[in-house]
Structures are given as structure tokens and as C-alpha cells.
Image (cartoon, rainbow, N blue to C red):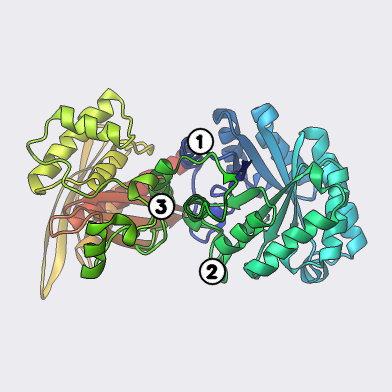
């Protein structure tokens, strides 16, 4: 069996997605879940990019054990020093990922350098990185648009300098699967010392081909795949990890000898976490992790599924962590049933969190006839939020309707003191947000507001996600309730608390 190394770049390329910004605690929370998921390498960030990025990579490198922690660097000493400074606490698990563009268009217009100069810079950078860590990865950026002969030369040189992984990026998502597979095969066949390194691939999704290109590369000899959860990343994103893993697992006939260490039952939970913390909503029709990925609407399909599941289902939802959709709990369920269900969903809570989550469950079960697993995830996520609750909602009243200006009175609590304000607005949510702003005195701009229903039905929980920007930093807040105004208020307060936390750091 051949194992593919799963290199997760959600915290680096994923975080480069426009509007996705994670603070260091959020990065650590995602990294912890990535370990549960079973990834081999976590690219935790680009340490030279900012102090925040440096600190986040260092935090992940110091807390996360048992996987390789990687920091990205351009082929410059100062970048390599920063990457080393951030990952060195991971000791033998530290990796430095050096990159330099090799395509004509990048060399000519971006770098303004000739091939020989690029060769020199790449070899010097890898040599320098190798003095610091034994695990050095090199990426010829825009490899899929580079001259293959030049690629062979540069790859051979950097391997001679000690690069142990050679990553071939399709930086702008331009490649076609067959062509990309041939490129990998060409590297395997033409680079003399290629047996001293692992071939990796890193595909972007500009033409929607990132997963197809990655799989074609695996068929042609790549043994590390770089990917992100939910496929987030620059522009149209990166190859989605869950799709690659499930394609390899589902098509055993094609990928006969390929395995990975991913625990697929953790996929759904990881996807939800990344979506919640980045504020990037997963499209309902997204393969593997979308809400509709395992729903069958048409009568013919439902009939087929009832007769034999495999007629219309190629993956069992449970295998990727979706639970059987059925009634799980209701208002008569007790604490024991509640905690047993959480346990079977793989959710671990402290006694205090469990007590508080159970209270919330009881309130919800009184409003909703049936409480589904998705509702439980939502309740629990509220409990385990890592943001300090500087401001908390006490209560609010809204008066709105056709032809009247919405009016709201809202009461918040902070450090034991109560604060009440009234406001009007364009709508009830706007009025609430204005009243909250009057209380907390923070100037922030609302970039995005999103509402989703957690399950179906009139009594479903509404989940609101807001993205706000204050002093150039964007934060995401999330709130859930059967009352969508309350969910909107909770989401706004969580974002405000994150801004407050950022100010204190
Ligand atoms: O897309 C790309 O080329 C990259 C490199 C830094 C690997 O992200
Ligand atoms: Zn990339």
C-alpha cells in the first residue's frame, strides 16, 4: 500500500481566501481538529507576512504534537529566518516550505529575473533552510505554466541541496487533469535524483479542476496532496480535502494501492468548524459536506434508496460524520440521553459546559418538537466558543411591522453591570445593531450578514453569521436561535467580543 501524505493548508492558503481571517486561538482550534482528522502536515501560516501570522504559527507549533508543522517562506533569508523562528519549537516535526516562481510570465514580469538567477536563488534558499531544519519543501510557483525542462533542472538542484519534498503547484488553476498528470510523470521520469524526495501537488480551483488535477497527479506518482477543508483558498480556492479523500476511498478500483491516515468520520465536524470560524458558508450542494449531499428529493430516488441504498448513494453519510437524520431527542429526553447522544456524535464537553448545554437543549426542546443532531451541534458550538463573553445579551424587545419604523430596546451585561439602550433602524436587525453599538462604543463596519436554517421545518434553528471589520481586521460572529432576530443579535455580540479581544491582545 502507498500512503498519500495529507498536507493541510487551510490555515495558510485557506486563510488567504478574501474575507477569511482567523485569530491565533481560532487557528489553534482548527489545528487541534485537523489532528483528530488525521492530517500529516499542517501548514500553519506565512510567518513573515505579519506579527499575527508569526505568533499563530508559533502557537500551533508549540501546542500541536505528532504532526509536521510547516511555515511558508519566499526564497529570502529574512522569510526563512521568520519561518524557522515560528516553527522551531516543533523540533523534529518542523518543516520550512520555500517557494520561488519558475514560469516565464512570473520570472519576467513579477521577479524580473532570468532563469540562471532563479536557479541560484532557489538553491541558496534551500541550502539556507536546510541548515535550520532537516525537513525542507520547495515549490516552483506556477509550475504548471513553467517550461518542464527548466522545472527538471531546478528540482534536481534543490534536491541536491537537501529538499525532501518537491511541491508542484498549479498556482492559477490553469492545468487540465491529463496534462497535469503528464507533468508529474515527466518529473518522475526526467529528474535524476527524484527518488530522494516526495512529489507533492498543490492545485487551485479557478477552472473547477483542482480535485481532478490532484487525483490525476496521484495516479501519476504524487504522494503528497496539498488541500484545504471545504476547498477554501485564494480566489476560487484550493483542492478540497474531503473530496480528494472520499474519491480515493470510494474508487478503490482506480486507487487500489492508495491509503491515507484521514479518519473520515471527522470530516463533517471539521468542515463545520472551519465554516463557523471563517464565516464561509458551505454551499448546500457542495460534494461530501454540503447539507444536501446526502438528501434525496425525487420520488424515484427515494424509492430506489429504500429498496437498495447503493442505487443512488455512493458514500454512506455516516462514513463522513453525518448522522442518520431521524428524530433523536425531544422535550422528554433526560440528561442521560442528552449526554449519551453527544458522546455518540464524538462531542466531549466539560461538566460545566455539559450542564449549560443541557439547559439550552431543554429551552430548545420546549420550542421545537424534535431536536436533531444538527441542532445539538449548534447548541454545543455556542458552549465551546473560545471568545470571552465580554458582552452578553440579557434581553430585548422589538416593535416592527408594515408602515412603522422598527424600534428596539436592548439590555446587555458586562462584568456584572447592566446597560440598556433604545434605537430605531431600517429593519429590526438594523435597529438592534444600532442599539448595541450605542452600548459598546465600538466603531465597526458590517461586511456580510448571512442566515441559514440548521434543519428544515418552521421551528428550525436559524443560524446567523456576520462578518465585521474594525481597524482593518475582520472578525466573524455566529449565533443560533429559533428566533432569527435573537440569532442575529447573538452573532453581532460575538463579533463585538472578538473585536474587543483583539484590542486587548
Ligand atoms: O498556489 C501556490 O503556488 C502557492 C505556493 C506558495 C505553493 O500557494
Ligand atoms: Zn496556493
| Residue 450 coordinates in the image, percent (x, y) | 32, 61
Report which residue position mark 2 lands on: 208
**Could you tell me which quadrant the N terminus lies in?**
top right
- Is 427 on the left or on the right of 163, as rendered? left
Q: Residue at x 48, y 56 (%)?
A: 243
Q: Earlier in the sequence, mark 1 or mark 3?
A: 1
Q: Residue at x 36, y 49 (%)?
A: 495
Foreground residue among 153 and 125: 153
In this view, 372 is above or below 237 = above
> Looking at this view, is 257 or 83 the one in front?
257
Label 1 crowd (10 A; few <14 / some 14-19 / many >=20): some
The numbered mark at residue 275 is 3
Q: Which residue is mark 1?
A: 35
Rendering quarter of residue 57: top right
N-terminal of the pair, mark 2 or mark 3, is: 2
Q: Earlier in the sequence, mark 2 or mark 1?
A: 1
User: In the current view of this chain or complex, which residue is farthest to the top?
Assistant: 351
Amino acid at each position: 500500500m502507498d500512503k498519500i501524505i495529507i498536507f493541510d493548508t487551510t490555515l495558510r492558503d485557506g486563510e488567504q481566501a478574501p474575507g477569511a481571517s482567523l485569530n491565533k486561538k481560532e487557528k489553534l482550534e482548527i489545528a487541534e481538529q485537523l489532528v483528530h482528522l488525521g492530517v500529516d502536515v499542517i501548514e500553519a501560516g506565512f510567518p513573515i507576512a505579519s506579527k499575527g501570522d508569526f505568533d499563530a504559527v508559533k502557537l500551533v507549533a508549540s501546542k500541536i504534537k505528532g504532526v509536521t508543522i510547516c511555515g511558508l517562506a519566499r526564497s529570502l533569508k529574512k522569510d526563512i529566518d521568520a519561518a524557522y523562528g515560528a516553527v522551531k519549537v516543533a523540533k523534529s516535526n518542523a518543516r520550512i516550505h520555500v517557494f520561488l516562481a519558475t514560469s516565464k510570465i512570473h520570472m519576467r514580469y513579477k521577479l524580473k529575473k532570468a532563469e540562471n538567477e532563479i536557479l541560484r536563488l532557489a538553491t541558496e534558499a534551500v541550502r539556507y533552510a536546510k541548515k535550520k531544519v532537516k525537513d525542507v519543501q520547495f515549490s516552483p510557483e506556477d509550475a504548471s505554466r513553467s517550461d518542464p525542462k527548466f522545472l527538471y533542472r531546478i528540482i534536481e538542484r534543490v534536491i541536491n541541496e537537501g529538499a525532501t519534498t518537491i511541491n508542484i503547484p498549479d498556482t492559477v488553476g490553469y492545468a487540465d487533469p491529463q496534462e497535469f498528470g503528464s507533468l508529474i510523470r515527466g518529473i518522475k521520469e526526467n529528474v535524476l535524483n527524484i527518488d530522494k524526495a516526495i512529489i507533492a501537488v498543490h492545485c487551485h480551483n479557478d477552472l473547477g479542476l483542482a480535485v481532478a488535477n490532484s487525483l490525476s497527479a496521484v495516479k501519476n506518482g504524487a504522494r503528497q496532496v496539498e488541500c484545504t477543508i471545504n476547498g477554501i483558498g485564494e480566489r476560487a480556492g484550493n483542492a478540497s480535502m474531503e473530496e480528494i479523500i472520499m474519491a480515493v476511498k470510494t474508487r478503490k478500483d482506480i486507487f487500489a494501492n492508495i491509503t491515507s491516515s484521514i479518519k473520515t468520520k471527522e470530516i463533517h465536524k471539521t468542515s463545520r468548524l472551519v465554516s463557523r470560524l471563517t464565516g464561509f458558508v458551505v454551499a448546500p450542494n457542495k460534494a461530501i459536506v454540503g447539507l444536501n449531499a446526502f438528501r434525496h428529493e425525487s420520488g424515484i430516488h427515494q424509492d430506489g434508496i429504500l429498496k437498495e441504498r447503493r442505487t443512488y448513494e455512493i458514500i454512506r453519510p455516516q462514513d463522513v460524520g453525518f448522522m442518520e437524520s431521524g428524530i433523536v431527542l425531544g422535550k422528554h429526553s433526560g440528561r442521560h440521553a442528552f449526554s449519551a447522544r453527544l458522546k455518540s456524535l464524538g462531542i466531549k464537553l466539560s461538566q460545566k459546559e455539559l450542564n449549560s448545554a443541557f439547559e439550552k437543549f431543554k429551552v430548545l426542546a420546549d420550542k421545537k418538537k424534535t431536536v436533531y443532531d444538527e441542532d445539538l451541534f449548534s447548541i454545543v458550538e455556542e458552549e465551546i466558543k473560545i471568545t470571552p463573553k465580554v458582552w452578553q445579551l440579557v434581553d430585548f424587545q422589538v416593535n416592527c411591522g408594515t408602515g412603522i419604523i422598527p424600534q428596539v430596546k436592548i439590555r446587555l451585561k458586562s462584568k456584572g453591570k447592566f446597560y440598556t439602550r433604545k434605537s430605531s433602524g431600517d429593519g429590526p436587525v438594523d435597529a438592534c445593531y444600532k442599539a448595541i453599538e450605542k452600548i459598546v462604543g465600538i466603531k465597526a463596519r458590517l461586511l456580510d450578514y448571512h442566515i441559514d436554517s440548521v434543519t428544515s421545518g418552521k421551528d428550525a434553528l436559524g443560524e446567523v453569521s456576520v462578518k465585521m471589520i474594525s481597524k482593518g481586521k475582520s472578525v466573524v460572529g455566529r449565533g443560533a436561535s429559533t428566533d432569527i432576530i435573537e440569532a442575529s443579535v447573538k452573532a453581532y455580540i460575538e463579533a463585538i467580543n472578538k473585536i474587543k479581544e483583539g484590542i486587548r491582545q
